[in-house]
Amino acid sequence: MTALRIVADSNLPGVETVFSPWGEVRRVEGRTLQREHLLEADVLLVRSVTRVDRDLLEGTPVRFVGSGTAGLDHVDRDGLRAMGIGFAAAPGANANAVVEYVLAVVGAVGDVAERLLNGGRVGIVGCGHVGRTLAARLDALGIANCQYDPWLAEERLPTPGTLAEVLACDVISLHCELTRQAPWPSYHLLDAARLAALTPQQLLINASRGAVVDNRALAARLHAADAPRAVLDVWEAEPRVDAALLERLVLGTPHIAGYSLDAKWAATRLLADALGEFLGRAGAMAGALPSPEVIELPGHLAGAGLWRALLGSRYDPREDDRALRTLVSTAEPAQVPAGFDALRRHYRERRELAGSRVHVATEHQRDFAAALGCQVTLT
């Protein structure tokens, strides 16, 4: 079997472990990756920071591209097909990580968790892997929610709603792909007019793509006395960050919603499976993540306090908010993009709550933890 020459983004974890049975792995920084890096490469593994198109690949021996992402707007799939290059992505690999980010944000912002547990509603824009997973988690928690995704048949949505209905919910969570394609472009889906209709009681969360929200219009809207609360994990000019917009957000993070260690490893393994299928052979899959530490819950925790304790045991979005604000306030503006990428590249090993072992003291805790995907033991 001829060894493959594999070029991989420096921020994809586990590549050497998972792909070494197929050949030699060489790491390259994704945002600076160029055609010259691929002149002696058979396989390219990227993230969303790398634009993959004919300009990058033409004249190279690359015959398979894998993207460790769910979103695909950085890849010219038609161009790859025309060049006879195989392609695979990792849809769903980071879905639970993004969902836990959203739920952790809800727990970290004021009394939003209390309101949802007492009859509030979540509106979900986009019902792909992340949107469906979020809807399922909310259903398990007994929280009302509805979804808007005009690209899907209504019967494929758990609880379909119009865009107006979704945008009237207590929490609005965006999980759609970025597209300018008619008849339902998502580019600037939340424009000045739609942002103007949001109220101070609402929380807007964007963990999809930055340009789904008109960032300039959002900055202006948040300056008003009746502004809604907003949390952004993605930015329209990313990796540049609008400092004035960040200042007005409740929380701002550097595109790390799906950056759990579990999600990254899952993406790497999905790409390995896809490469094996493309080649007609399987590699020797090796390596596994160790189980995260057991969570012990004291008996007094319930309701929103339990929400915050469970989600917070694995992730607190305020840490990433502080890191981004420190970067933007202390670095020269020209250095912010590099700092933004560095925050992502050197991101801590964040584990997911789902699948974690949790020791609980009450039946309420048992049911709540189970709804979040935990392995529960009632003590």
Image (tube, grey):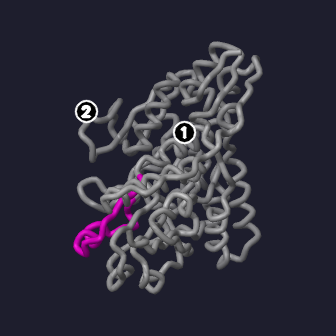
User: Residue at 74% of width from left, 67% of height from top?
Assistant: 329
| Along the viewing direction, whichever of 54 and 62 lies nearer the viewer | 62
Residue 76 on image: x %, y %: 32, 69
Tell me the crowding category of disc 2: few under 14, some 14 to 19, or many 20 or more residues within 10 angstroms, Cα based.
Answer: few
Residue 207 visible in the current orientation:
yes
- Whether residue 137 sits left or right of residue 65 in the image: it is right
- Considering only vertical position in the picture, is 29 above or below 325? below
Tell me the crowding category of disc 1: few under 14, some 14 to 19, or many 20 or more residues within 10 angstroms, Cα based.
Answer: some
Numbered range of the magenta stretch: 72-90
Residue 81 lies in the magenta-colored region? yes
Secondary structure under badge 1? loop
Q: Which residue is mark 1?
A: 202
Residue 365 lies in the magenta-colored region? no
How far is mark 1 from mark 2, CA to CA? 28 Å
- Whether residue 372 sits left or right of residue 313 in the image: it is left
| Along the viewing direction, whichever of 202 and 282 lies nearer the viewer | 282
Which image quadrant is residue 376 in? top right
Sequence order check, earlier mark of 1 and 2: 2
| Along the viewing direction, whichever of 155 and 121 lies nearer the viewer | 155
Disc number for residue 155: 2
User: Residue at 65% of width from left, 20% of height from top?
Assistant: 377
Residue 220 visible in the current orientation:
no
User: Residue at 63% of width from left, 13% of height from top?
Assistant: 363
Circle nearer the viewer, 1 or 2: 2
The residue type indicated by label 1 comes to Gln
Secondary structure under badge 2? helix
User: Residue at 42% of width from left, 72% of height from top?
Assistant: 4
- Whether residue 46 sits left or right of residue 150 in the image: it is right
The residue type indicated by label 2 comes to Glu
Residue 14 on image: x %, y %: 57, 58
Which image quadrant is residue 58 in? bottom left
